[in-house]
Image (spheres, grey):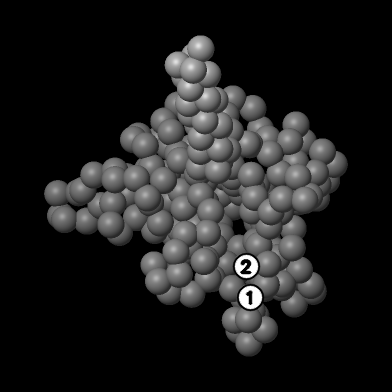
Amino acid sequence: MKKRTLLFAWTFILFLTVLVLEIVYTPYDYAGYIQNNNVGEGVAQADRPPIEGPYQVVMVTCEQWQFLFYPHVAGSPTATIVLANIPVLFIVRSMDVTHGFYVNTAGQWASQGFQFGVMAVPGYYDYVVWNFQPTAAAYTSGQSLYHVQCSEYCGVAASGLGHPWMDALIIVVPNNSTGIAMQRQMMDNNTPPILTGTLS
C-alpha cells in the first residue's frame, strides 16, 4: 500500500511541475491581447488573436537577411513608426527559413535584454501584440527607439553578412498631435491603420 501511495504522490508532483513549466515558459499557448495584459504572442496560429480595439496593424516580412515592415518609413522598409499607448498587432511571416522576430527594449542593442518577440515560421502567419509606452527618451527627442533582432540562426551570406546583421527599427512617437504629424511626415502619410472593435 505504501508503494502505491508513494507512486501516486510522485506522479502528482511530476504532473504539477510539468503544468507549472508549461504555463510559465510557454507563452506561445496564448495568442490574444486582453486589456489586463500587455502582450500576447503566438507561434503558427491559424487565426488572428482576439484583440480589443483600437489597435494598430503592422505587417512584418522576414527573409534572409532583413525585416521588411508594411507600412514603413519612406525610403526605409526596415523601419516603421507606431503611436504609443495604442496596442500594435504585428503580423509576422517568413519567406524562406525560420526567423525570430524579437524586439529589444529601448536603449542599447543588446545591453537591456529582449522585451517581447515571436518566431517567424515558414508557411504560417505568426502574431504578437505589444502596447508601447513612452520612455524617458521620448520626452527629450520626441520618440523612443526599439531595435528588432533575429533570435533564430538563419544562415550567412557569401560576403560574410547574414544572421548577425539582421535587424530593424521600430520608432514609437507620442499619441498626440506632434507625434502624429511626425509619423505622417516620416512615413509619407502611409501610416499603420488603426482599427477599432474586437478582432477574433
Above or below residue 170? Residue 93 is above
Classify 74 as above or below 174.
above
Instruction: Tell me the residue at 60%/81% (across/down).
Output: 137
Q: Residue furthest front?
A: 1
Along the viewing direction, whichever of 117 and 37 lies nearer the viewer: 37
N-term-proximal mark, 2 vs 1 = 1
Tell me the quarter of the image containing the C terminus. top right
Label count reads: 2
Q: Are marks 2 and 1 in contact (CB under 8 Å)?
A: yes
Residue type, numbered disc 2: Val
Q: Indicate the position of residue 56 as horizontal and vertical percent values.
A: 70, 51
Gap in angstroms between the C-alphas marked 2 and 1 = 9 Å
Query: At 21% across and 48% down in the image, what residue appears?
Result: 156
Q: How many residues crowd around disc 1 within 10 Å: few (fewer than 14), some, or many (20 or more)?
A: some
Image position, residue 40 (x, y; %): 64, 44
Determine which residue is flagged by label 1: 135
Describe residue 5's horizontal placement relative to residue 49 as left or right: left
Q: Amino acid at mark 1?
A: Thr
Residue furthest to the right: 197
Q: State the image quarter where residue 96 is shown.
A: top left
Residue 164 percent coordinates (x, y)? 28, 57
The answer to whether residue 101 is above or below residue 133 is: above
Label 2: how many residues lie within 10 Å, few (<14), some (14-19) or many (20+)?
A: many
Q: Residue at x 51, y 35 (%)?
A: 17
Q: Does dot 2 land on a helix, a strand or a loop? A: strand
